[in-house]
Amino acid sequence: MHSGPPILVIPNAWDVASARALAAVPGCRAIATTSAAVAQSLGWEDGERAPGDEMLQAAGRMAAAVELPMNVMLRAGMPDPATLRGLGVARVTWGAGLAAAAYAEAVRIVSETLRT
């Protein structure tokens, strides 16, 4: 019962240097980030003030700097809704080199965009 694979621990990075440092930790199998950490590392306060494209580019730079899967959490600071509508959330995410992303407001924003 207690001999299964180790639990997956996903540490949070906030920039390229922290992503590289975490990736170098033995046993690290994936890296994540939070919207607040990335926003603040770019000089923005949390609270959905950072431009989404800037946030996505920063996360993409982190993903490119390591050989581990990278997950990013973006709140309403996300790529332009027209970009998401035209390309799809998955393509925008993978195009940035990310393994996964959580766009907290994506469903609401894309559905509002489609109605206009």
Image (tube, rainbow, N blue to C red):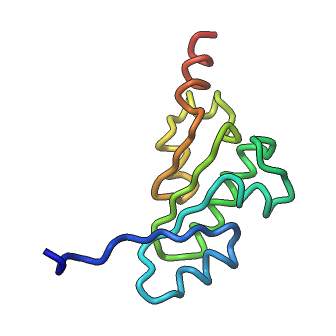
Residue at (71% x, 59% y) in the render? 38
Numbered label tally: 0
Q: Tell me where residue 1 appears, x and y as whole percent.
A: 13, 74
- Residue drawn at 41 percent across, 75 percent down: 29
Identify the residue at image location x=61%, y=25%: 109
x, y (%) of residue 40? 79, 59
Q: Quadrant of the C terminus?
A: top right
Answer above or below: position of 42 versus 89: below
**Looking at the picture, does residue 12 appear above or below residue 90?**
below
Q: Residue at x 19, y 76 (%)?
A: 4
- In the image, is 86 to the left or to the right of 28? right
As drawn, 75 above or below 10: above
Q: Is residue 116 above or below residue 79?
A: above
Q: Going by the picture, which residue comes out furthest to the left?
A: 1
**The quarter of the displayed image where residue 66 is located:** bottom right
For this orientation, the residue located farthest to the right is: 43
Identify the residue at the far front of this view.
1
Q: Position of residue 64 (x, y in %)?
A: 58, 69
Question: In x, y percent, where is residue 7?
Answer: 33, 72
Q: Nearer the viewer, residue 16 or 35?
A: 35
